Image (cartoon, rainbow, N blue to C red):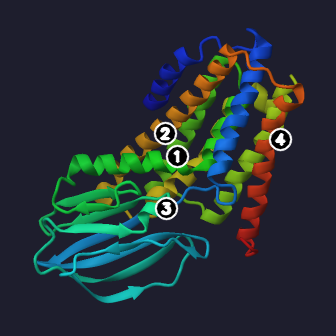
Amino acid sequence: MRLSRSIAARLAPLIAGHSPHVDGDHVTAARAALGMAVLLLLTGVSVTSAHEMRPGLLELHEISPGTYSFLWKKPSGGEVEIQIAPVLPKEWRLRTPDRQPLTPGAVVVRGTLECPAGLEGQTVSIAGLEATATDVLVRIYHADGRLESHLLSPAKPSITLGQSGGGRQHALGYLQLGVQHIGLGIDHLLFVLGLLLIVSDRWKLLKTISAFTVAHSLTLAVATLGLASIPMSPLNALIALSIFFLGPEIVHAWRGETSFTIRHPWVVAFGFGLLHGFGFASGLTSLGLAPGEIVSALLWFNVGVELGQLAFVICCIALIRSFKTLQVRWPRWAEILPGYAVGTLGAYWTIQRIAILLGGPQ
C-alpha cells in the first residue's frame, strides 16, 4: 500500500489537467498518438512471443574445499532452446554432467564442479548472452554461509568472482531482474497502456494504476511464498485474454459510451492485476530461491517491477502532454485504431496461447 501511495503521489503532478473537460479534441488526438506510438514500439519488440523471457541461473554450492555442486538452468521458448552457455575457467572440471530433457521454460544441467584453485579472482561468462534479451543470475553458496550473487546481462556477460557480490549486489541484482521482467513483459505493458487509453480522469487513473499495483503485488507475494500458483500455459492465455478484453472497452471510451469497466476501471484493473501478479512471479519462482533469501528477493524484485511500471506510465503521460502541446490532430478514423490494435493483438495472443495449451502448433 505504501508503494501504491508513492506511485500515486509521483503521478499526480504529471497528470494534472489531464481531464476530458479541457481541450477535449487535442486530448483525444494526443491519446490516439500515444496509443499508436507505444503500440508500434511494443509490437516491434515482439509479436509472436509477447510474454517475458525468464532469467537463466548458474548456481554453485560448496560441498568441500574446491568442490561444488553445479546447476545450470537456461530459459527456453517452447521447444526452442536459447543458445547460451556458461564459459568456465580452464582449470575447472565439471564431473558427471546430467542434462535433463527439455521442459517447459527451461533446460537444466546438474553436476559436480572441481575448482582446485578456488573461485576467488576467477572469471565466469555466459557465451551468447549478448545476442539475447535475457539475464543470468549467478549464485554461489559458500561453506561458511556467505551468499555471493551477481547478475549478468547482454551488456555485461562476464563477472570476476570474489569482487563484491555481497548484500548490496544481491539486492541490486533482484531489483534489476524486476525492471527487466516488466520491461520485456510486452503483454503486461500493453495491459497498462489499455488502462491509460480508457481512463481520462486523473483521480480515476490514480486509483486504477494503484489497484493494478496492489493486486499484482499481492499475487506476486503469494506465488513466491508458495501459497498458491497457476500453471504457466493457462495463466499466459488468461493474461492475453485480459488484453483482448480491453480492446472493445477502449473503443467504447473513444465513442463516449459507458460500461462497467469505464465507470469502475480500478475494479477491472484489480481483478486482472491478480492474474498479472502470478505472471510476474514466474521470474522469481523459476530461480528456485533458498528459504533464507525469499523475502529479500521478493522485496527487491517487486520494487524493480514497480519502478519499471512507474517509468512506463510516466513516459506515456509525458507523451500525451507533449502531443497535446503540439496540438497533434489525427483523422477521426485514426483515433480509434489503438483500441482495435490492442483488441486484435490480445485476440491473436489468446488464440496462440490456447493452441499451445491444447498441444497445438506454437
Q: Residues within 10 Å of mark 3 (few under 14, many from 20)?
A: few
Residue type of the residue flagged with mark 3: Thr
Residue 340: give its label. Answer: 4
Q: Residue at x 79, y 20 (%)?
A: 329
| Percent position of residue 181, x then y | 50, 50
Quadrant of the image containing the C terminus = bottom right
Task: Confirm or deny contact between disc 1 and disc 2 (CB under 8 A).
Answer: yes
Query: From the viewer's perspective, is 144 left or right of 180?
Result: left
Give SS at disc 1. Answer: helix
Q: Which residue is mark 2?
A: 308
Under circle 2, the secondary element is helix
Q: In the rendered image, which residue does mark 1 sit on?
A: 182
Q: Earlier in the sequence, mark 4 or mark 2?
A: 2
- Residue 8 lies, in percent from the top left, at 52, 23
Observer-nearest of 119 and 141: 119
Residue drawn at point x = 47 percent, y = 49 percent = 180
* Nearer to the camera, 298 or 322: 322
Identity, as a three-letter code, of the amino acid under mark 4: Tyr
Residue 290 in view of the camera: no
